[in-house]
Image: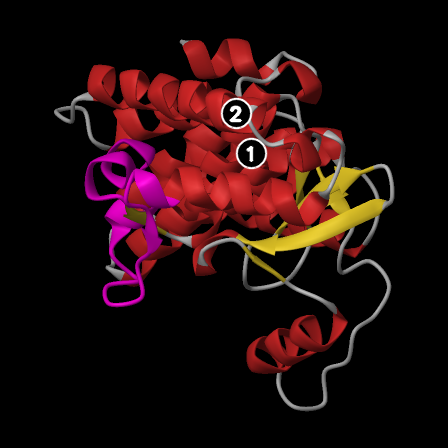
């Protein structure tokens, strides 16, 4: 499976949009993934052509780079889905390309796809609750909100956004704008789908989603523990124990490991 192969690759070698397309095909097997793949190529070509005509962007002006990508996304009709934000289609890249709407991380992934095609350094940011991305240039980083038409956020706007997410007492702190790799961006996208399935009471679907995430990130210990808990709730005791074994191999020490061992002991008693 393509996801298994991607799980063995270094982060820098991942095809961000390609892996997201694989996730989407599993989630919506009847959707037209070939049309989505062709559309991704169209986005990239349009962006390369647009960037070639903007000297300021080419010279490293991050505001102009944000404007160029924002204009490309607008020409294709993309916008953040504020009306039906919790629709699972907003986390499926095929359906995002069909509807031209999506979650912040889905639109951000398309921004990163476009930036990579143009050759402009960009990455996701470890900001809580709302996906943001960073455009890198000779004079630092511009923080961009792909959900709101590529708005460039300075410190006051970031502080306001953080308070909306974490409450009025929240303040900007170190680490909020830490760059993240491609794999965490893909996991964040897929995690939205998993959470929507859990809210809908679809535990088997959430487990399948988690298993797909593990194909991409087999060293992600927390995902093995989540899979163990879901298998336990579905009364799949053998599978739960196997997941706990993988978790403990990756994280043998600490409080979480102690809880996992207690859970495993309880499950083994249920087998006898």
Q: Mark 1 and mark 2 in contact (Cβ < 8 Å)?
A: yes
Residue at left 55%, top 20%? 117
Residue that label 1 marks: 112
Q: Is residue 80 magenta?
A: yes
Relative vertical location of residue 181 with respect to residue 85 in this rendering, above or below: above
In the image, which disc is placed on residue 216? none
Secondary structure found at label 2: helix
Could you tell me if residue 32 is visible in this image?
Answer: yes
Residue that label 2 marks: 16
Front residue (pair 23, 108): 108
Relative vertical location of residue 271 with respect to residue 145 in this rendering, above or below: above
Residue at left 51%, top 28%? 113
Percent position of residue 70, x then y: 47, 46
Relative vertical location of residue 50 with respect to residue 140 in this rendering, above or below: above
Q: Which range of residues does the magenta coloring cover? A: 74-100
Q: CA distance from mark 2 to mark 1?
A: 8 Å
């Amino acid at each position: 499976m393509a996801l298994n192969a991607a799980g063995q690759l270094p982060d820098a070698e991942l095809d961000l949009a390609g892996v997201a397309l694989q996730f989407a095909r599993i989630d919506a097997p009847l959707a037209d993934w070939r049309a989505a793949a062709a559309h991704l190529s169209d986005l990239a070509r349009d962006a390369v052509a647009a960037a070639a005509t903007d000297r300021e962007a080419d010279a490293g002006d991050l505001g102009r780079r944000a404007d160029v990508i924002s204009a490309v996304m607008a020409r294709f009709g993309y916008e953040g889905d504020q009306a039906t934000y919790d629709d699972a289609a907003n986390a499926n890249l095929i359906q995002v390309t069909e509807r031209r709407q999506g979650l912040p991380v889905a639109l951000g992934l398309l921004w990163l796809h476009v930036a990579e095609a143009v050759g402009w350094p960009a990455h996701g940011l470890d900001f809580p609750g709302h996906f943001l991305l960073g455009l890198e240039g000779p004079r630092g980083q511009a923080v961009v909100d792909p959900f709101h038409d590529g708005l460039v956020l300075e410190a006051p706007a970031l502080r306001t956004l953080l308070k909306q997410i974490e409450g009025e007492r929240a303040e900007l702190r170190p680490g909020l704008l830490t760059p993240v790799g491609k794999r965490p961006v893909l996991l964040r996208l897929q995690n939205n789908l998993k959470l929507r399935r859990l809210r809908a009471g679809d535990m088997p679907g959430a487990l399948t989603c988690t298993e797909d995430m593990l194909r991409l990130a087999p060293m992600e210990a927390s995902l093995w523990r989540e899979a163990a808990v879901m298998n336990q709730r579905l009364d799949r005791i053998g599978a739960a124990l196997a997941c706990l074994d993988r978790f403990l191999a990756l994280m043998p020490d600490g409080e979480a490991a102690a809880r996992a061992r207690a859970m495993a002991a309880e499950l083994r008693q249920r087998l006898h």
